[in-house]
Image (tube, helix red, strand yellow):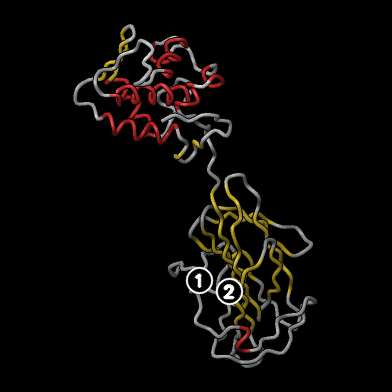
Amino acid sequence: MKSLKIGSFYAVASAAAIGIAACSTSGDMGPLSPTSAKYVLTTAAVGDAGNNTPNQGEIEICKYGTDAVFNVGPTGGASSEVSIADGTCKVVVVDLSTGNTANSYTVSEKADPSYTLQSVQRTDIQFVPNTETDAPVTGPTSTSDPVVALINRFHGTHLVYHNNPVVEEEGCTYTKGWYRNKNGSQTIIAGIDGLTVAQQQAIFNATPGKPGGWTWGADNNNLNLYQQLLAALNNLGGDANAGPDDVDDAIADALAATSVSGTTITVAPGTDVSGLIDVLSAFNEGTLEGFPHCDDEVLTVQ
């Protein structure tokens, strides 16, 4: 199979340049103007890998973005499901009938919560009967799903489907400021790092100017680190392994490097305090995929 390249499939004249008259909706072929394109009757069978180009006698689908399932069949008749993997092409209809009436087939992508349809590009090839030389090509042009194509020995359709994967959101996050304010403080989970709700509320409320009886050494970032750690753990429901890998690693490192005794927060010497703050604050601020910022935050304090 040829390498897959969207937007540069064909070096052929466009429909506008060659004045092609497409098949009518009734299936009768209109007059066609010759071009340099050649007759390319398919030799494939249904289910074969496609060659990423339009060929007479077939409908071929190329798929990008995600795997997908298609319903394919004669228009108005029974259809069959066809699975096509991301980055591949597959022949889904072969019709080598002759005559001046092409047969109508409908292609539709099966809806799935794991993806959304971004676009469909369509290219049609139409052979001039009795010449064995000329096959004008129309496309690629944007179209919509479902697609109805007229196919027989003299007609072929090439379809390119683009899908966007749907990223399931695993939860939303609050900043440490949320857990400081009146509403957020009531959502704090008891037992985070062995602390009561009241202890956590006091730590979130502490600032360098108003420590509230808490101490954390000479570096105010020590307080910030522990507040970001508590916020991350509360955002994850207390599960230190429920976030993205880098966040879980930062939580583990922060838990190992910090401790609370009475009203004193201690951070072990040599801890990459700034680096851990960067990771945990990014998570709490909702900048990581799958964990957006909660909409009802009313106060953010850095």
**Does 35 appear above or below 151?**
below
114 left or right, relative to 253: right
Q: Which residue is mark 2?
A: 140
Quarter holding residue 282:
top left
Q: Residue at x 44, y 26 (%)?
A: 176
> Closer to the N terminus: mark 1 or mark 2?
1
Query: Is there CB contact under 8 Å for labels 1 and 2?
Result: yes
113 and 204: which is toward the camera: 204
Could you give the CA–CA distance between mark 1 and mark 2, rounded to whole angstroms?
Answer: 8 Å
Residue 171 x, y percent position in the rendering: 53, 32
Q: Position of residue 102 (x, y in %)?
A: 73, 77
Quadrant for the C terminus in the image? top left
**Regarding mark 1 in the picture, which secondary structure is present there?**
loop
User: Around disc 2, counting alpha carbons within 10 Å, would you say few (fewer than 14), some (14 to 19), or many (20 or more)?
Assistant: many
Residue, x 58% and y 74% (percent of image)? 140
Camera-side residue: 33 or 263? Answer: 263
Q: Amino acid at mark 1?
A: Gly
Q: Nearer the viewer, residue 266 or 49?
A: 266
**Image mark count:** 2
Q: Quadrant of the N terminus?
A: bottom left
* Residue situated furthest left in the rendering: 270
Occupied quadrant, residue 73: bottom right
Q: Is residue 49 above or below residue 140?
A: above
| Mark 2: amino acid | Pro
From this viewpoint, which residue is outermost toward the front?
209
Question: Secondary structure beneath disc 2?
Answer: strand
Q: Which mark is residue 147?
A: none
Q: Is residue 195 above or below residue 25?
A: above
Q: Residue at x 59, y 58 (%)?
A: 118
Task: Give the residue at x 56% y 20%.
Answer: 183
Q: Which mark is residue 7?
A: 1
